C-alpha cells in the first residue's frame, strides 16, 4: 500500500506541474481559459496533502508496531 501512495504522489505531482505550466499568466486567474487549470491545481494540492497524511500514517504505524513488539 505504501508503494501505491508513492506512485500516486508522483502522478499527482506531475499533474500539478502540468497545470502550472499550462496556466496562462497573462489572463485572469479565474478567467474562462484558466478555470480548468486552477481547478486542477486545487485538486493537486488536496491530493498532495492526502499523500503526505498517508505517508505520515504509515511511518507512525511502523513505529507503533516496533514499540509493541
Image (cartoon, helix red, strand yellow):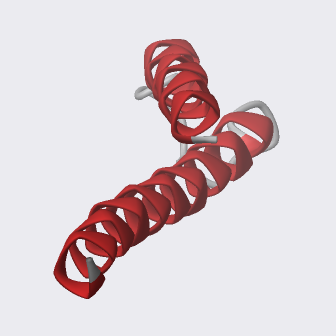
Q: Is 31 left or right of 66, judged from the image as shown?
A: right
48 up-or-down from 56: above or below: above
Determine whether, in the image, residue 3 is placed left or right of residue 59.
Answer: right
Residue 36 at x, y percent in the picture: 79, 38
What residue is at 61 percent from the left and 31 percent from the top? 8
In this rendering, is residue 35 above or below 4? below
Image quarter for residue 65?
bottom left
Residue 37: % across, % down: 67, 35
Residue 9 location (% of width, % of height) = 50, 33
Q: x and y percent of residue 35 in the render?
A: 75, 45
Judging depth in this view, the residue of 48 and 24 nearest the camera is 48
Frontmost residue, 37 versus 14:
14
Quadrant placement of the N terminus: top right
Eyeballing the image, is 8 above or below 48? above
Residue at image coords 51%, 16%: 14
- Farthest residue to the front: give it: 69
Left/right placement of residue 27 relative to residue 4 reads left
Identify the residue shown where x is 28% and y is 74%. 60
| Image quadrant in which you'd find residue 11 | top right
Q: Quadrant of the C terminus?
A: bottom left
Residue at image point 72% right, 51% down: 39
The residue closer to the viewer here, 2 or 20, is: 2
Amino acid at each position: 500500500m505504501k508503494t501505491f501512495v508513492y506512485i500516486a504522489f508522483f502522478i499527482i505531482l506531475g499533474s500539478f506541474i502540468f497545470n502550472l505550466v499550462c496556466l496562462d499568466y497573462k489572463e485572469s486567474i479565474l478567467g474562462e481559459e484558466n478555470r480548468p487549470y486552477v481547478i486542477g491545481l486545487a485538486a493537486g494540492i488536496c491530493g498532495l496533502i492526502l499523500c503526505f497524511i498517508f505517508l505520515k500514517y504509515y511511518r507512525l504505524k511502523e513505529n507503533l508496531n516496533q514499540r509493541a513488539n
